[in-house]
Amino acid sequence: MKRKIFSASFKIAIGFCIILSSFVSGWATTSEGDLPSKTAVILHAINNQLVIPDEQLTPPSFLTGSNASGGTAFEHESLQIPVSDGTVLPGRMHRPADAENAPIIVYYHGGAFMEGYGNIHTHDNIVRALAYRSNAIVISVGYRLAPEHVFPKAVDDSYDALLWTYEQAEELGGSKEKMVVAGDSAGGNLATVTAMKARNEGGPDLTAQLLYYPLTTFHDRPLETRDKYAGGNYLLSKTVMEKARDSYTPGEEMWENPYVSPLDEGVGEDLPPAFIATAEFDPLRDEGELYAHKLHEEEVPVEAIRYEGVMHGFLSFYEVLATGRHALDDSVAFLDRTLKDKQVAGAGFRIIEREQPTGFERLREETEAHVGAVYLLGLHAQRQFDQWVETSLLADSEEE
């Protein structure tokens, strides 16, 4: 009897696993290519609104892990950053409790330059992780957003925040000789144009720039990935990109400014060494890699890495995507080499393709993906049941 029960249970379990795998496989199959299971589950959760991340940026709570600071005690503080027109910007700082002569990273968050798409809170997990991994002081800047504030307000705010940080460096426990700018997406654009502005206006000498899937041109260039991955399935759509451009740069003449389109209009000469991360499934992949080539051609040391199997914004999901953790670690390693004045680029230049996780890490990703899929299927079933109950109650009330 026990053997029959065990056999039946085993067959049910096998059947369930097959069905579950078919769901995950279906989510992972797209017209643009096959996705890794973990990426597919996260995108399915968001695109089907089974889990709605805060302002579309923070990772789904059911997949969130924990951060580790490596044992270093950190302080976390809200800041008020004064800028040149008399406004005070919100900021957020993470720093080692015993900071002394530490590197300072000024971070500009992503979010399409627009209100409601990103702020210092939605990107705080990235800033916190960057601080923990680098043992640097990391300051996140709440620059002003469109449509109320159009170009060049965000650029001016970003540069003013850099100047303020430079002036406060020693008081904060940092070093004026170890200043770095960093940012993701729209913030990657602001980071590199802030580096340009610092060079052009005799501002602080910067040690490095860390650019995660940066937006580098507002022009209508024929870029394959802008079309291929802009349907909205990979966290950044053509609709949002066009809305951002219309909101942030309402005049087409603005696109010709080097502080808007550094790829096409900017001069890379004498900019600090750059780390540029791009994602395989990202409308901004081509322009990020073209910007890496541009900097290299203008003799700026560059390390450019394409991370396979992930989408735009993948760094925000580093708690659940191993590739996100790899990107953070790679950028910190680049920064460490730069601070130590070691060579940061090979004799030639190429885009390094960072492969998906393998071995035990891959097994863990697959397991977590399928656990997440079970959760999502449960959410879907609960939603369907709730809708059925609501419909039944409505029908009963109408009959009465």
Image (spheres, rainbow, N blue to C red):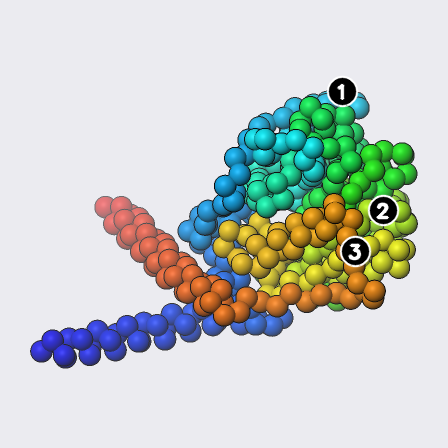
- Residue under pointer 1: 86
Q: Amino acid at mark 3?
A: Gln
Q: Is residue 134 left or right of residue 344?
A: left
Q: Is residue 74 left or right of residue 114?
A: left
Q: Amino acid at mark 1?
A: Gly
Give the residue at x 64% y 62%. Answer: 307
Q: Residues within 10 Å of mark 3 (few under 14, many from 20)?
A: few
User: How many numbered dots are placed on residues in this image?
Assistant: 3
Q: Are marks 3 and 1 in contact (CB under 8 Å)?
A: no
| Whether residue 201 can be seen here | yes
Which x, y percent locates residue 62? 42, 51
Q: Earlier in the sequence, mark 3 or mark 2?
A: 2
Q: Are marks 1 and 2 in contact (CB under 8 Å)?
A: no
Which x, y percent locates residue 4? 14, 79
Q: Earlier in the sequence, mark 1 or mark 2?
A: 1
| C-alpha gap between disc 1 and disc 2 | 29 Å
| C-alpha gap between disc 3 and disc 2 | 16 Å
Give the residue at x 79% y 55%. Answer: 343
Please identify the quadrant where the N terminus is shown. Answer: bottom left
| C-alpha gap between disc 3 and disc 1 | 41 Å
- Residue under pointer 3: 343
Q: Which mark is residue 139?
A: none
Residue 145, compared with residue 331, is above or below; it is: above
